[in-house]
Amino acid sequence: MNVIKTKIEGLYIIEPRVFKDARGYFFESFSQRDFDEQIAIPLIGKPLVFVQDNESMSSYGVMRGLHFQRPPFTQSKIVRCVRGAVLDVAVDIRKGSLTYGQHVAVELTEENHRQFFISRGFAHGFAVLSETAVFQYKCDEFYHPEVDGGISILDNSLGIDWRIPAEKALLSEKDTKHPLLCDFDNPFDINVNLYEEK
């Protein structure tokens, strides 16, 4: 796999090697060995084990996010779009980070097979650009609703171009109630190792 570093430490684009012929294509969608060697060990000094896989299906204009889990149940994610296309975004919410409040946006599609690794300390969301999209993500921590959190996906201060007209945006009631970045009670600190054993 080809790993592309982004402008923000802890966010990586992953491009698998795709083998195509007259029958179709084949690729390894995940290799624990390659992931640990190229991302986890250089980033956090040890392997990273994923424990839960999720999948969602959404129609055009659906926007989900910007989500995170609070300590001690923070999550890393590897996300990909297996049908359709999404704009996937991660926002740095680590207090004290030189890139605090900045984001990386990546278009993930069934054609480009790209994946996006988002380490702990980021808020994550996506917008559906195609008629429908099937979105998958691997998490290194189980879902804990009691520590579920979010930043408003419509926070203009983040400067995100979601590429969805405002009148076409579809949000859950929960996602309309998240606070702006400037207003939320931030539990993340750049000086705290979020990968320490609980």
Image: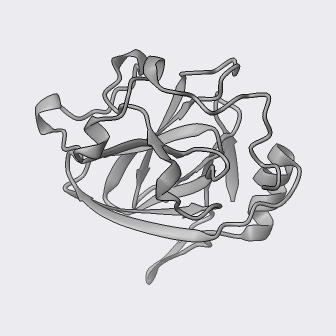
Q: In the rendered view, does 159 fall on the left or right side of 146?
A: left
Q: How many marks?
A: 0
* Residue in the image at 36% along x and 31% along y: 152
Q: Which image quadrant: the C terminus? A: bottom right
Pick the residue in front: 103 or 189.
189
Pick the residue in front: 88 or 158.
158
Q: In the rendered view, does 96 fall on the left or right side of 172?
A: right
Colour scheme employed for the rendering of this structure: one colour
Q: In the rendered view, does 149 fall on the left or right side of 118?
A: left
* Residue in the image at 38% along x and 28% along y: 179
The location of residue 10, given as percent across then percent down, is: 69, 39
The location of residue 111, given as percent across then percent down, is: 41, 59
Quadrant of residue 66 in the image? top left
The location of residue 46, given as percent across then percent down, is: 87, 56
Pick the residue in front: 26 or 168.
168
Q: Which image quadrant: the N terminus? A: bottom right
Decide: is 109 above or below 33. Answer: above
Q: Residue furthest bottom?
A: 23
Quadrant of residue 154 in the image? top left
Q: Residue furthest front?
A: 146
Q: Residue furthest left?
A: 167
* Residue in the image at 41% along x and 67% along y: 55
Q: In the rendered view, does 193 fall on the left or right side of 175?
A: right
The location of residue 193, given as percent across then percent down, is: 80, 40
* Residue in the image at 29% along x and 45% along y: 174
Q: Residue furthest right?
A: 45
